[in-house]
Image: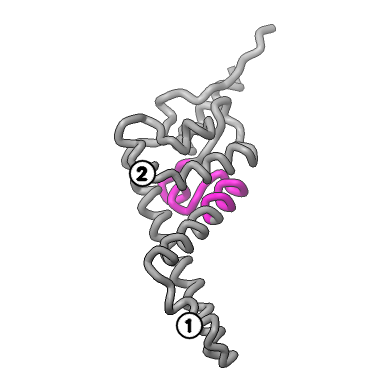
Amino acid sequence: MENKKFTVTDDLLASKGQRLLNFIIDLFIIYVIEISIGTTIILIGDLTKSDTASNWVSSLSAVESFFFGLVILFFYYLITEMYFSRTFGKYFTKTIVVKHEGSRPNMKSIIVRTLSRLIPFEPFSFLTAERGWHDTLSVTYVVKKHDFIAKKKLFFEE
């Protein structure tokens, strides 16, 4: 009896178009979360007659706002990919994050994947390679969910 091992193949990988759409949708969601948090802080400050929090949000410089966005980006990707193996963008494009053998990524892989996203110009890594830096550094793959499930099921039925 031979021991068969499933592996992710190139035909399962999400297209560059899907990856770009994931990126755009996720950036939009992160921006909405950032605006929502800032607005909530201002509203709470107004309701409690505490100007400290409202003034802090209103006076954020462009650099401070950028780093605030990076913190939100970090937690957005960490939480959604750790618990669901996908972000809202991946949900919309019907893609999912997996390990090479088709299993869910572990916490270490997701943390490496999320931290890799903070590398400057990381989104442009897709222009020169099939998989971006956050994929290669974390040894993860973004695959078309339905094709992946069907191929994995077929593989284990043989």
How would you classify the magenta stretch by its main secondary structure?
A: helix
Residue at 46 percent of width and 45 percent of height = 117
Label 2, secondary structure: give it: loop
Q: Quarter-wise, where is residue 44 in the image?
A: bottom right
Q: Quadrant of residue 47?
A: bottom right
Query: For the view shown, which residue lies furthest in the right direction?
Result: 1
Q: Position of residue 125 (x, y in %)?
A: 36, 37
Q: Who's the residue at 58% across and 17% down the image?
A: 158
Question: Taking the image as drawn, is residue 85 in sight?
Answer: yes
Q: Which residue is mark 2?
A: 121
Taking the spot 47% from the left edge, 49% from the top edge, the residue there is 91
| Labels in figure, total | 2
User: How many residues crowd around disc 1 within 10 Å: few (fewer than 14), some, or many (20 or more)?
Assistant: few
- Residue type beneath disc 2: Phe
Image location (x, y in percent) of residue 38: 48, 74
The residue sitting at the bottom extreme is 49
**Mark 2, residues whose alpha carbon is within 10 Å: few (<14), some, or many (≥20)?**
few
11 in the magenta segment: no
> What x and y, as percent, mark residue 24?
36, 53
Q: Is residue 98 left or right of residue 10?
A: right
Q: CA distance from mark 2 to mark 1?
A: 32 Å
Is 90 in the magenta? yes
Please give the residue where the numbered disc 1 appears in the rendered image.
55
The image quadrant where one finds the N terminus is top right
Amino acid carrying label 1: it is Asn
Q: Is residue 4 above or below residue 43?
A: above
**Disc assigned to residue 100:** none
Magenta region = 76-95
Quick one: 115 or 77, which is closer to the camera? 115
